[in-house]
Amino acid sequence: MLEIKNLNVHFGVIHALKNVSLTVNEGEIVTLIGANGAGKTTTLRTISGLKKPTDGFIFLDGKDITNTTPQERVKMGISQSPEGRRVFPTMTVLENLELGAYLRKDKKEIAKDLEMVYERFPRLKDRRKQAAGTLSGGEQQMLAIGRALMSRPEILLLDEPSMGLAPLLVQEIFSIIKDINEAGTTILLVEQNASMALQIANRAYVMEIGSIVLSGKGSELMQSDDIKKAYLGG
Amino acid sequence: MEQLLQQIINGISLGSIYALIALGYTMVYGIIKLINFAHSDVYMLGAFIGYFSMTTLKLGFLPSLLLSMLFSMILGVVIEKVAYKPLRNATRIAVLITAIGVSLFLEYVTMAIAGANVRSYPPLTGILTESFNLMGITITMQQILIVTITVVLMILLQFIVKKTRIGKAMRAVSLDSDAAELMGINVNSTISFTFALGSALAGAAGILVGIYYNSINPLMGTLPGIKAFVAAVFGGIGIIPGAMIGGYFIGIVEVLVSGYGNSMYRDGVVFAILILVLIIKPSGLLGKNTREKV
């Protein structure tokens, strides 16, 4: 469904992504793990169109989308829940969710999806009139994911959904991610919490200083000695 | 007491004009963090368009108001596209200096075309020239007109910002433009729309100040522009209701200083207020004190 070929990204003189290639097939959860500064977030930002690559290609369903705008990509079915949640703090929970459906015109279907998000995250329904900035970290993460779902994406990009959350909440967020995937949304998940990510992922890529150094099935990578040493704490 | 009320009525009229200009400063700052120095010249040109519309084209007041708002709106969008958009990723100081350049450009091009001399605004006619007494206070129809138009425009603005799709996009972009882009919001067209709104309000302020003070000239924007900027900072820059409150506050203070103190000090007092705000509450009346993130 999503294919990235030899992507190179520069920030000034810094070569942030070096020939990154990866594929996400329909229905999969694919995770991209690696240390801080490896280029995971840059990869997602480039897929969403916020960052222009110096060269390389991005394909969605076989179509070259490398030179399209972020808006066009949202329309084509790419949606991202960014690192650090980035909810609109002074707007209400409902307004945040409505902005997720900004490009859609089908009012009835939007209302349906809103109900679906509320069902998945009942706490958001209770707090729908509250300013998003007053929510707890976990609730804001749920809002960021819910907001990304409101565009009814084919592929959902999740950037560090477990960041800064208590262990119990991390469990909850990961089981929600699994549910969303089982309901038919393909997921590309960027995580620092490698062990959790590998548990739910079909396949995984490991990034180090701008390059993909390893890839394979999630379960296989969990057994790999290198991975254990570098990311799983022994 | 009567005199005080009279002064406050006058201050509200003047404050309306400052508030309209301050809204443009504050909205543009909110969305691209730029103090748009050319804004005061959009206001000046709004006054000139109103003048030509009422004299050369012989249109009435309301059509002239709409024409000058429309012209200012287009001018604001063009300024943004030509001067600021190419600098979207440049440092803030580069954009700021460009804004000063645009301001000077507009002032002196206007001077070259229309001349540097002061023009007297065409007088209003009919019922708009009348005034009446209310318990010893004189209220002119002109003042009622200014305040009414301002309040209508402010309500309209609040409606656009709070309730419409593009208004929500404006707020989203001003809060977090990257996140807004991820929602599929076109950031560039949202910025254009913000300039259009702010400039239309400045155009309205231009024609209103024309009928209030009866005289216009190509440099008329400078001082009211700075005072409106002070109003925006006073209310909390980037915050729309703050600009409204700030505008009225500055207008009333200025009139009271002229009325009770010495009119020589009226401009000085406004800047003293700016200094006090920056010392006591730099984020303004409605602003939240945020710590600079490191």
Image: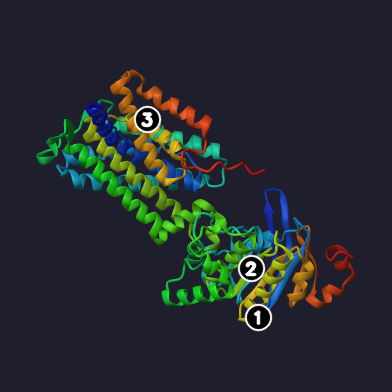
Residues at marks 3 and 1, CA–CA distance in whole angstroms: 61 Å
Q: Nearer the viewer, residue A26 or A192?
A: A192
Q: Position of residue B167 (x, y in %)?
A: 41, 56
- Give the residue number, with chain letter if any, for mark 3: B222
**Between discs 2 and 1, the one toward the N terminus:** 1
Give, as a three-letter code, the residue at label 2. Leu
Residues at marks 2 and 1, CA–CA distance in whole angstroms: 13 Å
Q: Is residue B274 placed above or below A146 in the rendered structure?
A: above
Chain bearing mark 2:
A
Secondary structure of the residue carrying numbered label 3: helix
- Give the residue number, with chain letter if any, for mark 2: A157
Chain bearing mark 3:
B
Residues at marks 2 and 3, CA–CA distance in whole angstroms: 49 Å
Q: Say yes or no: labels 2 and 1 on the same chain.
A: yes
- Give the residue number, with chain letter if any, for mark 1: A27
Whether residue A165 can be seen here: yes
Whether residue B221 can be seen here: no
Give, as a three-letter code, the residue at label 3. Thr
